[in-house]
Image (tube, helix red, strand yellow):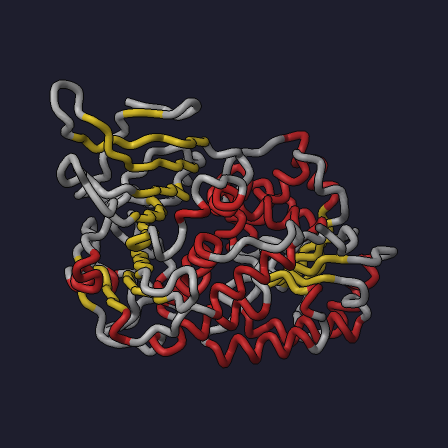
């Protein structure tokens, strides 16, 4: 249930930056094309640019990221405004206030480094631009627990929590939202998702490309800060949380926050850190850097539902495929009158590319006798819907819907979970195109091995700037042999 008024202006700081070029302009064109962006769009930056320069940058961005829709771009171009000025100069914000005109509920999107959040929010308040407004801030939201708390305090000096929207683009993915819907719209799965029936959970976020020229950025983050603390823990929360009490945004975020509060803080013994052997050849990477490009972690959820169920998460660069997948492995039947089952039952949720839900079952092998064979049912397969995560999230923020944005307590709990393993230690090397250091297998112990995802497509068109994948996956999941109605079989 949305209670905030719809924004009547969009201001985005960092309008000439890399994020705007790669993500924001394509998202804005998509919103215009869908008819959900009709308000002035005011870019703010210090680049010595003019409005015509910004329009040219927007066109070039669209040509490089999905194409220019001439009708939509003409409308977007007409909505664009531009203020060139220093974020530390009060005059910049005086001009912004004038440009906002009669707008009463502007949305300020800070696509800028967190170190500038305090400066910008204070000037927004002093100039009157914060009155009736909301603010959207990018990840990483902090560098650790202490900095996240300090950043929250800084922003809350001007904006109440109800007006703060923290973007995690992963929550804008169709598949991540589908995972939440799948759980609570079907009685079939929910009674089985607990410690009585689940043996273990694995989540893999594999990327076949490296740091793609972002060596300087990665030196300040690493895999744990970049994707475990936010993307992966949000997936854990949505997969394992209790049912929200109602469909409103706060009920969903309450359930997610409560689950994160049940997750035990990681210790060094819970984590394996790896670094691809060609990392030091990347521009911007320090000689001898110990920043991890791979991380595997075992999480423990100390709740009545999940106590004792291992949750194993791994993320990494230059792995064999680009795919994010969740596997829930169920316990074996208490009695097997026909002999050992060929395989464990498992629920697979492919989050990228595309959306796919499959179920591993055992069926009778054709012929005489009662021997079995493993089969995989495709319960759901959905191609990309054309709406990129930033388009979905910025549209929600404009509408005042905070459901898919991380709340203060969620962010701080996620930092609390990883805080003790953020200190760099010598990572284990792994070769590009492999599944990471062998020590990650030992982390699982008797609950292993890792289940390596095999992407089945259905994702967005490849970004020409994304490097090609290395090789192919080993240890693939069983191929599809049967399908339910609406699925695709082989």
Query: Is residue 267 positioned above or below 78 on the image?
Result: below
Question: Residue 92, percent across and down?
Answer: 73, 68
Q: Residue at x 17, y 43 (%)?
A: 474
Query: Is residue 218 positioned above or below 474 on the image?
Result: below
**Residue 61 seen:** yes
Tally of numbered tags: 0
Q: Residue at x 47, y 66 (%)?
A: 260
Question: Residue 163, percent across and down?
Answer: 70, 64
Q: Is residue 31 left or right of residue 170?
A: right
In the image, 369 versus 390, the foreground residue is: 369
Query: Is residue 279 positioned above or below 77 on the image?
Result: below
Question: Residue 45, percent across and down?
Answer: 64, 61
Q: Is residue 80 left or right of residue 266?
A: right
Quarter holding residue 58: top right
Q: Is residue 352 left or right of residue 267?
A: right
In the image, 24 versus 244, the foreground residue is: 244
In the image, 232 versus 338, the foreground residue is: 338
Q: Residue at x 41, y 58 (%)?
A: 232
Q: Residue furthest right?
A: 102
Q: Quadrant of the C terminus?
A: top left
Q: Residue at x 35, y 66 (%)?
A: 300
In the image, 96 versus 297, the foreground residue is: 297
Question: Residue 478, percent across and down?
Answer: 22, 35
Q: Is residue 104 left or right of residue 64?
A: right
Quarter holding residue 403: bottom right
Quarter holding residue 417: bottom left
**Residue 57 seen:** no
């Amino acid at each position: 249930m949305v209670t905030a008024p719809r924004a009547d202006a969009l201001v985005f700081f960092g309008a000439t930056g890399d994020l705007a070029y790669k993500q924001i302009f394509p998202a804005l064109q998509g919103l215009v094309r869908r008819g959900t962006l009709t308000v002035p769009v005011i870019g703010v930056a210090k680049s010595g640019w003019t409005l015509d320069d910004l329009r040219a940058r927007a066109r070039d961005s669209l040509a490089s990221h999905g194409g220019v829709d001439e009708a939509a771009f003409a409308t977007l171009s007409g909505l664009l405004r531009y203020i060139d000025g220093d974020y530390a100069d009060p005059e910049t914000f005086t001009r912004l206030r004038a440009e906002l005109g009669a707008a009463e509920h502007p949305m300020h999107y800070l696509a800028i480094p967190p170190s500038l959040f305090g400066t910008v929010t204070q000037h927004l308040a002093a100039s009157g631009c914060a009155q009736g407004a909301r603010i959207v801030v990018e990840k990483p939201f902090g560098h650790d627990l202490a900095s996240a708390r300090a950043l929250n305090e800084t922003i809350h000096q001007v904006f109440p929590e109800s007006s703060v929207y923290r973007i995690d683009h992963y929550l804008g993915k169709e598949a991540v939202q589908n995972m939440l819907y799948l759980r609570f719209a079907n009685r079939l799965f929910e009674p089985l998702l607990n410690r009585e029936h689940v043996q273990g959970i694995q989540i893999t976020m594999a990327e076949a490309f490296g740091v793609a020229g972002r060596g300087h950025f990665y030196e300040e983050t690493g895999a744990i800060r970049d994707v475990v603390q936010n993307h992966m823990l949000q997936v854990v929360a949505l997969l394992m949380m209790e049912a929200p009490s109602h469909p409103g945004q706060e009920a969903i975020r309450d359930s997610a926050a409560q689950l994160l509060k049940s997750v035990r803080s990681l210790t060094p013994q819970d984590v394996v850190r790896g670094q691809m052997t060609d990392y030091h050849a990347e521009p911007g990477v320090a000689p001898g850097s110990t920043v991890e490009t791979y991380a595997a972690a075992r999480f423990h959820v100390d709740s009545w539902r999940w106590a004792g169920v291992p949750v194993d998460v791994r993320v990494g660069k230059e792995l064999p495929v680009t795919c994010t997948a969740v596997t829930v492995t169920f316990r074996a039947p208490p009695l097997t009158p026909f002999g050992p089952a060929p395989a464990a039952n498992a629920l697979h949720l492919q989050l990228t590319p595309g959306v796919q839900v499959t179920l591993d079952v055992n069926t009778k092998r054709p012929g005489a006798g009662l021997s079995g064979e493993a089969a995989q049912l495709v319960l759901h397969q959905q191609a990309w819907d054309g709406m990129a995560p930033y388009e979905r999230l910025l549209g929600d923020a404009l509408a005042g819907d905070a459901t898919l944005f991380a709340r203060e307590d969620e962010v701080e709990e996620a930092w609390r979970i990883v805080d003790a393993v953020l200190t760099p230690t010598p990572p284990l090397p792994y070769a590009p195109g492999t599944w990471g250091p062998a020590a990650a297998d030992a982390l699982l112990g008797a609950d292993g091995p890792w289940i390596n995802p095999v992407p089945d497509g259905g994702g967005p068109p490849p970004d020409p700037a994304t490097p090609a994948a290395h090789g192919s996956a080993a240890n693939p999941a069983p191929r599809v042999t049967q399908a339910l109605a609406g699925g695709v079989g082989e």
